[in-house]
Image (spheres, rainbow, N blue to C red):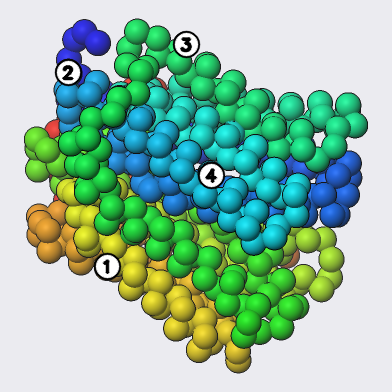
Amino acid sequence: MSGPDILDSGRAGGMAIRGGALRVLGYGAALMLSLVSVPFMTRHLGVVDYGHYITVSSIIFIIGGLTEAGLTNLGTREYSVLAGADREHFLRNLTGLRFALTTAGVVLATLLTFVTGAETVVVQGTLITGIGLLLTLTQQTYAIPLAARLRLGSVTALELVKQGLLTGTIIALVALGAGLIPFFAASIVSGLGVLVVTLVLLRGQVPLRPAVTRATWQHILKDVLPYAVAVAVGLIYFRLAVILMSYVSTDYQTGIYSTAFRIVESIGVIPWLVVSAGFPILARAARDDESRLRYALQRLFEVSTMVGALIALVIGLAASFAIDVIAGLPEFEDAVPVLRVQGIALVTAFLVATWSFALLSLRAHRELLICNAAAAAVALAGTLALAPTLDAMGAAIATLGAEAVLAIGYAIALHRRNAALTPNLAVIPKVLVAAGAGAAAGLSPTPAVVDAVIGGAVFAAVLVVLRAVPPELMHALRGRDPEGVDDEPDH
């Protein structure tokens, strides 16, 4: 590309802010698209075949998490700090390595389902859906330059293309009266379609031919291994309570916890979408400009605290409405307080996302692993200690505690890496005042969804009055690039 790198320009911050907001909207649209196909598919396949479909999806989710190994984030970081031929060499080798790892993972998963006596349809489904996973992860690798260049509108569009193809294929198969096997192949249609669109979009801009350079592969694997383990532990600890509840509590309490957990799990993607938009800026600043890194992290901390508190407040006020929509039965009322406690964890989730990307930018892989292991230990011990007596609420408290430990651990690790990166906490009292005002305004004898809207509006208004909202955020959302991105925070 000609001209100066966008990551070095004053437009980068505004593009990241708008891109983060666009990715959240795109995620919401993709989630709605995915929900469109579910009723058609469940009614068409029936309980048994739909159970097989979910079983295979769960296997592929695990394989995808293990073989992905944090390579997308690591690739974004390296692409953001490399230039010229080094970028091309790295991306070609990353593509080749990901192809090899994913292929090995899919083959191994298929063999394991076969030798462990899984039903033939599950074995076949694992292989077929695994091919779709291979196409999807390959596409994600080729799309790394889009994220690194802050072309987040294109990234969002590709995600919608993928989900649209998947939903459309599933609905078409239902209309054709297809059996179960073709539904597994829907992931291939979706993965191949979005891969083709990505390659057309990036034609002439990135190298398309994978490479196998032994020294480069060894360097990437050595670099990614501790981060990959940290990512794997992070995937596990957040779901530990769900798994342990089936052993230490009743089926009813497990269902109560799982109902609330599914809502928080879906919303919990948002912090990572928002913060990842600014990750290339953090990676470049970590290489070149400590003052810019300090400034960006401070602003991310402020925005993360405010947005996390807003979402937690809205969930707290709208919890009964959300459970009614998801479950719709009186016996699920006990999930409402559980959801409120789990919703608080979204405050820490935003901070975890912010400091996780900061530590990754600083190549602090070991610290990430240690902190994630500590969170997993807290989730394990907390659930075993609290769930037998407090049931679903105990598991929710344990998960909240694990999230808090992880956020604190990341903050300490960041401070130890560079004390200058320790956040200024001046925004917290303002957020607490706004949250109190929002909660008070939302506690009215109106429907829960109305309470949530009122409470959220009051929360936002108080933050504006207290001048807690960074001016860059307001400027960027109005379509103007914020000035002074390289300046230090004026606290």
* Mark 3 vs mark 2, CA separation in Å: 21 Å
Dot 3 falls on a residue whose secondary structure is helix
Do the residues bearing badges 4 and 1 touch, measured as CB atoms within 8 Å? no
Amino acid type of the residue tagged 4 in the rendering: Val
Do the residues bearing badges 3 and 2 touch, measured as CB atoms within 8 Å? no
Amino acid type of the residue tagged 1 in the rendering: Ile
Pointer 4 or 1: first along the chain = 4
239 or 419: nearer the viewer? 239
**What residue do we see at 46% from left, 27% from top?**
139
> Which mark is drawn over residue 429?
none
* Mark 3 vs mark 4, CA separation in Å: 29 Å
6 vs 240, left or right, is: left
Residue found farthest to the front: 115
Pointer 3 or 4: first along the chain = 4
Q: Which residue is mark 4?
A: 107
Pointer 1 or 3: first along the chain = 3
Pointer 3 or 2: first along the chain = 2
Dot 4 falls on a residue whose secondary structure is helix
Q: Is residue 269 above or below residue 431?
A: above
> Disc 2 vs disc 4: which is toward the camera?
4
Dot 1 falls on a residue whose secondary structure is helix
How many marks the image carries: the answer is 4
Q: Which residue is mark 3?
A: 200
Determine the image quadrant of residue 99.
top left
Counting other residues with Cα less than 10 Å from the Cα at mark 2, is it few (<14), some (14-19), or many (20 or more)? few
Which quadrant of the figure contains the N terminus? top left
